[in-house]
């Protein structure tokens, strides 16, 4: 329960506000995760795509 010192009114509060430092919104940790996800997607998606391109070139010749 939280009571206001000026008015004396008490309220049930589920959570109190928390101040968060927004100075460093994007850090090296987020950059590393972005690079890791991009590398994983490239590893999963590029081999089938290259296989399709190579098979199309063989059919045309």
Image (spheres, rainbow, N blue to C red):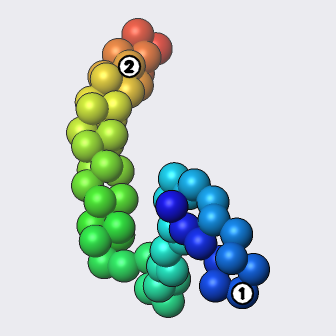
Secondary structure beneath label 1:
loop
Q: Earlier in the sequence, mark 2 or mark 1?
A: 1
Q: Tell me the mark number nearer the camera, choosing from 2 and 1.
A: 1
50 vs 6, left or right, is left
Secondary structure beneath label 2:
helix
* Label 2, label 1: how far apart the Cα atoms are: 72 Å
The percent position of residue 38, horizontal first and vertical second, equals 35, 51
The picture quadrant where one finds residue 29 is bottom left
38 vs 60, left or right, is left
The percent position of residue 5, horizontal first and vertical second, equals 64, 85
Residue shown at the point (31%, 23%) measured from the top left:
48
Residue shown at the point (41%, 10%) measured from the top left:
59
The percent position of residue 10, horizontal first and vertical second, equals 63, 65
The residue to which callout 1 is attached is 6
Mark 2 nearby-residue class (10 Å; few <14, some 14–19, many ≥20): few
Query: How many labels were placed on the picture?
Result: 2
46 up-or-down from 8: above or below? above
* Residue 41 showing in the rendered view: yes
The residue to which callout 2 is attached is 52
Mark 1 nearby-residue class (10 Å; few <14, some 14–19, many ≥20): few
Q: Front-most of 45 and 51? A: 45
Residue shown at the point (70%, 69%) measured from the top left:
9
Q: Front-most of 34 and 56? A: 34
């Amino acid at each position: 329960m939280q009571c206001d010192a000026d008015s004396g009114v008490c309220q049930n509060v589920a959570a109190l506000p928390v101040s968060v430092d927004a100075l460093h919104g994007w850090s090296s940790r987020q950059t590393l995760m972005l690079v890791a996800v991009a590398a994983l997607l490239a590893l999963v998606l590029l081999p089938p795509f290259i296989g399709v391109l190579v098979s199309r070139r063989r059919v045309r010749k």
